[in-house]
Image (spheres, grey):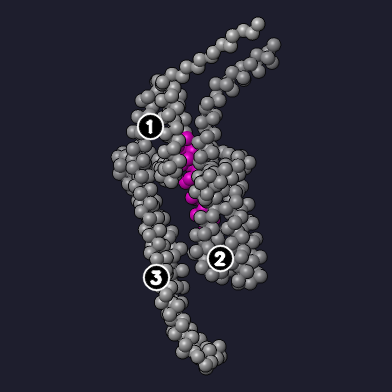
């Protein structure tokens, strides 16, 4: 005789359903506002990178707001100067090109090609048709130009918003930290507050160190390009410095770019560029990098490359630049989180050896 089937009743509390619903809403909002969250993340990294500098000024009697404004203004002045140095030579070349346009036109009108076209029957009709096609394409060209102008304006607006967001985060960082720790027990704050400060120090050391190394790399590339007669040495120096911000692979890409440009000069310039870049990369890897990062959290080359690959796949170039400080923060947190377990295992090993 078969036993009667039993019904299993699963009761899900209303609180659990509300928590699941809230988590789902947060995930949906995060997906919809991914660009905004990315901007907040980048602003937070910039603010954390500058925080120890501001803290150093505060320790010497400055107010937090004044120190943050001065540091941020110095950063903005540095970026503007860098852009002007890079765009200056290019703008001069563009002006020279437009100034030479009348000469180029005279040379073109005196060429056999132009004379052959104008002497061909029906040249007036061809010119008239070309002008009609040009006039018909002007609306599309205007729409394209307006779209480009709108994109540039949107990018500038996003940059300004990002700058102010980073500035406000820099001013209010201690207040935000204290407010968050206000929800935790005193023993949790005593344990994890130093971890937060160490993480901020790791981010700052990594970012400032990377910028310092990139400045050195850009200077070496710019001076060597100028000595070897490469075109636009300042621009090449800025490009090298920006590429050098990407750990491990940026310097190699910069060396390839410099070598390709050197091909337009001479074979000797190519050989000299390759030799200079190879020597500098060894100096950077074994002398400059350890000196600059002596206070930062050390990461193995394998960890650095993995962090760069993962971060660049998620966030592109920005992710590649921020990979090292982010990996340093993860290492600090994991080291503290695993400290009790490591101490317990160390005691067990000591007891095993004594027994």
Quarter that holds the C terminus: top right
Circle 1 packing at 10 Å, graded few (<14), some (14-19), many (20+), is: few
Q: Nearer the viewer, mark 1 or mark 2?
A: 1
Percent from the top left, x then y, of residue 100?
45, 81
Quarter that holds the N terminus: top right
Residue at image mark 3 = 139
Q: Nearer the viewer, mark 2 or mark 3?
A: 3
Q: Which mark is residue 146?
A: none
Circle 3 packing at 10 Å, graded few (<14), some (14-19), many (20+), is: few
Percent from the top left, x then y, of residue 227?
56, 68
Residue shown at the point (36%, 33%) measured from the top left = 176
Q: State the residue in front, 252 or 125.
A: 125
Q: Where 123 falls versus 213 (above or below)? A: below
Residue at image mark 2 = 225
Q: Write the start and end of the magenta stretch as one range.
A: 199-219
Magenta part, dominant SS: helix
Q: Pointers 1 and 2 in contact (CB under 8 A)? A: no
Q: Nearer the viewer, mark 3 or mark 1?
A: 3
CA separation, marks 3 and 1? 54 Å
At numbered mark 3, what does the secondary structure look like: helix, strand or loop? helix
At numbered mark 2, what does the secondary structure look like: helix, strand or loop? helix
């Amino acid at each position: 005789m078969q036993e009667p089937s039993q019904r299993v009743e699963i009761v899900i509390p209303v609180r659990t359903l509300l928590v699941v619903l809230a988590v789902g809403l947060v995930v949906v909002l995060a997906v919809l506002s991914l660009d905004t969250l990315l901007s907040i993340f980048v602003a937070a990294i910039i603010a954390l990178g500058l925080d120890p500098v501001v803290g150093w000024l505060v320790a010497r009697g400055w107010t937090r707001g004044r120190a943050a404004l001065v540091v941020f203004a110095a950063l903005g002045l540095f970026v503007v100067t860098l852009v002007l140095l890079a765009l200056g030579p290019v703008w001069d070349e563009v002006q020279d090109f437009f100034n030479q346009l009348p000469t180029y036109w005279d040379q073109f009108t005196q060429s056999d090609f132009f004379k052959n076209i104008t002497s061909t029957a029906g040249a007036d009709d061809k010119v008239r048709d070309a002008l009609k096609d040009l006039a018909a394409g002007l609306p599309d060209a205007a729409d394209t130009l307006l779209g480009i102008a709108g994109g540039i304006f949107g990018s500038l607006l996003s940059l300004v918003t990002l700058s102010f967001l980073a500035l406000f985060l820099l001013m209010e960082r201690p207040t935000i930290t204290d407010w968050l720790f206000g929800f935790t027990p005193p023993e949790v704050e005593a344990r994890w507050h130093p971890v937060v400060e160490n993480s901020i120090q790791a981010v700052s050391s990594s970012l400032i160190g990377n910028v310092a190394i990139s400045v050195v790399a850009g200077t070496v590339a710019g001076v060597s390009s100028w000595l070897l007669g490469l075109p636009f040495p300042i621009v090449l120096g800025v490009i090298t410095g920006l590429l050098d911000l990407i750990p491990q692979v940026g310097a190699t890409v910069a060396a390839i770019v410099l070598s390709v440009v050197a091909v337009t000069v001479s074979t000797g310039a190519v050989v000299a560029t390759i030799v200079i870049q190879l020597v500098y990369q060894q100096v950077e890897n074994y002398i400059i990098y350890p000196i600059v990062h002596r206070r930062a959290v050390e990461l193995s080359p394998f960890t650095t490359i993995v962090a760069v690959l993962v971060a660049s796949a998620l966030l592109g170039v920005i992710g590649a630049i921020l990979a090292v400080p982010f990996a340093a923060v993860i290492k600090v947190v994991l080291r503290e989180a695993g400290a009790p377990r490591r101490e317990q295992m160390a005691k067990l090993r000591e007891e095993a050896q004594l027994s």
